[in-house]
């Protein structure tokens, strides 16, 4: 292994800085709020709704980021490190909170500033925890989701729906069906590993302020998690080309009319996609909780979604905050859920009939949001993520779980200090 500096520093050294500054500070007299976020299908609707109700407090405008989360982060890091004051509002992947907060790129929220998402009484536990760093709230949860176990009802027949990974492997092998699960060297691999180790009873990192975080990864539970990943990569149920498969590849393979797959682990976006593509096929989609490691212990399902952060160098924090309070209101949460298949973070919408009609899995998803565990909230998260990908990709290469455990723990300890990332 070669030692190197953290990826954040490397990006700043290697890539030219993008131009700073927005095109205009006002629009029709209202201060422009530039919102940097990935290209989501529900964006035009929520932006229009908030602008219509703003009464001159702000004029919200989206600035598209790359579709890939790594590409989104890279562009934001370059701009924020250059103190770009055109970044008013950021649609942050839930794992960026600690890094952006520690770097001073986003400003914390004061008590009472967030009208809709400022407490755990308002927001489900998993999303709320993902927005915290060093005792302060730096993110405003916008939406959230967890991975589910999806299955084809007609192909599963009268067999029981698997509850554990062991049951899933056994049933899939009996049906000679690949399990559609991601295997690319990407963030999705870290999502899976984090969920498995937490479901087994340990965690990757114990949070701490100012570099005091430490690697936990108790040996027994981590070996259980690694054994599941080994089986996913080496068992007959591994899909062809798994080492390059992402979430959308899994969706397409599972959705295909001639698919042999009975099972898929994926986010809820797969359901609106199949409803749009083939409403009849959508009726064959079943859903179940993320598989458990131990039958008697609920799984810590993977947690995704967006947190909203206010750029530290914005010229109008008040306008950005007003936009956040509109975007996190129940009306916009409902739009994001019904149009994008991304469940709301607000507890008051847990049994909303309009959302439930569009997302039949809403009750299960909201139940998992209270047991889901965020990926480590640490300033060095990107290096932690790269360490996991380096050791565990491809899944088919995992052979000696004790060896992989020792190597991974050593690399993660260096990664927390930004000392060594491959």
Image (cartoon, rainbow, N blue to C red):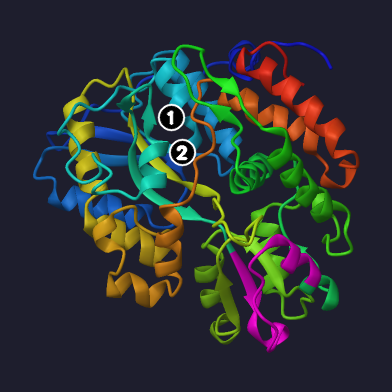
How would you rate the neighbour count of disc 1 (Cα within 10 Å): few for under 14, some for 14-19, many for 20 or more?
A: many
Above or below — where is 171 with respect to 20? below
Q: For the point 72% across and 80% down, which residue is it? A: 257
The span from disc 2 to disc 1 (Cα, nearest Å) is 6 Å
**SS type, badge 1:** helix
Q: Position of residue 349 (x, y in %)?
A: 27, 62
Q: Position of residue 196 (x, y in %)?
A: 65, 47
Magenta span contains residue 152:
yes
Quarter of the image for residue 7 reads top right
Q: Which residues are magenta?
A: 149-170
**SS type, badge 2:** helix
Residue at the limit of the structure toward the front, as seen here: 296
Residue 381 is left or right of residue 306, and the answer is right
Residue 249 is left or right of residue 207, and the answer is right
Disc assigned to residue 253: none
Q: For the point 53% across and 32% down, which residue is it? A: 376
Number of numbered discs: 2
Disc assigned to residue 94: 2
Above or below — where is 383 with respect to 58? above
Q: Which residue is mark 1?
A: 97
* Quarter the C terminus occupies: top right
Residue at the limit of the structure toward the left, as seen here: 55
The residue lying toward the viewer, choosing from 357 and 9, is 357
Quarter of the image for residue 114 reads top left
Marks 2 and 1 close (CB-CB < 8 Å): yes
Residue 406 is left or right of residue 301, and the answer is right
**Residue 307 appears in view:** yes
Q: For the point 46% across and 52% down, which residue is it? A: 371
């Amino acid at each position: 292994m070669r030692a190197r500096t953290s990826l954040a520093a490397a990006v700043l050294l290697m890539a030219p800085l993008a131009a700073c500054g927005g095109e205009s500070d006002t629009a029709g007299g209202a201060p422009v709020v530039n919102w940097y976020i990935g290209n989501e299908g529900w964006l035009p609707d929520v932006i229009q709704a908030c602008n219509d109700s703003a009464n001159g407090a702000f004029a919200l405008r989206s600035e598209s980021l790359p579709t890939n989360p790594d590409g989104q982060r890279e562009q934001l890091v370059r701009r924020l490190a250059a103190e770009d004051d055109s970044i008013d509002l950021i649609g942050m992947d839930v794992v960026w909170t600690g890094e952006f907060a520690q770097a001073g790129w986003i400003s914390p929220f004061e008590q009472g500033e967030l009208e809709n998402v400022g407490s755990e009484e308002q927001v489900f536990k998993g999303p709320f925890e993902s927005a915290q760093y060093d005792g302060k709230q730096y993110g405003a949860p916008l939406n959230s989701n967890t991975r589910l176990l999806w299955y084809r009802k007609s192909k599963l027949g009268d067999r029981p729906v698997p509850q554990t990974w062991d049951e899933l492997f056994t049933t899939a092998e009996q049906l000679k069906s690949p399990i559609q699960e991601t295997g690319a060297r990407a963030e999705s691999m870290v999502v899976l590993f984090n969920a498995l180790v937490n479901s087994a009873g340990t965690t990757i990192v114990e949070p701490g302020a100012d570099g005091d975080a430490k690697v936990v990864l108790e040996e027994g539970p981590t070996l259980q998690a690694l054994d599941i990943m080994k089986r996913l990569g080496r068992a007959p149920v591994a899909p062809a080309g798994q080492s390059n498969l992402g979430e959308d590849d899994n969706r397409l393979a599972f959705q295909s009319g001639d698919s042999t797959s009975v099972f898929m682990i994926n986010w809820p976006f797969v359901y609106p996609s199949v409803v749009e593509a083939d409403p009849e096929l959508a009726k064959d989609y079943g859903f179940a909780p993320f598989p458990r490691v131990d039958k008697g212990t609920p799984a810590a399902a993977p947690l995704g979604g967006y947190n909203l952060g206010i750029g530290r160098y914005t010229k109008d924090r008040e306008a950005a905050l007003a936009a956040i309070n509109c975007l996190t209101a129940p009306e916009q949460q409902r739009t994001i859920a019904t149009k994008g298949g991304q469940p709301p973070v607000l507890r008051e919408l847990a049994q909303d009939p309009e959302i439930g009609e569009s997302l039949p899995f809403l009750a299960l998803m909201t139940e998992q949001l209270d047991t889901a565990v965020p990926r480590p909230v640490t300033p060095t998260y990107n290096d932690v993520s790269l360490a996991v990908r380096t050791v565990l990709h491809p899944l088919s290469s995992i052979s000696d779980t004790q060896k992989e455990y020792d190597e991974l723990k050593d690399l993660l300890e260096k990664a927390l200090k930004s000392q060594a990332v491959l």
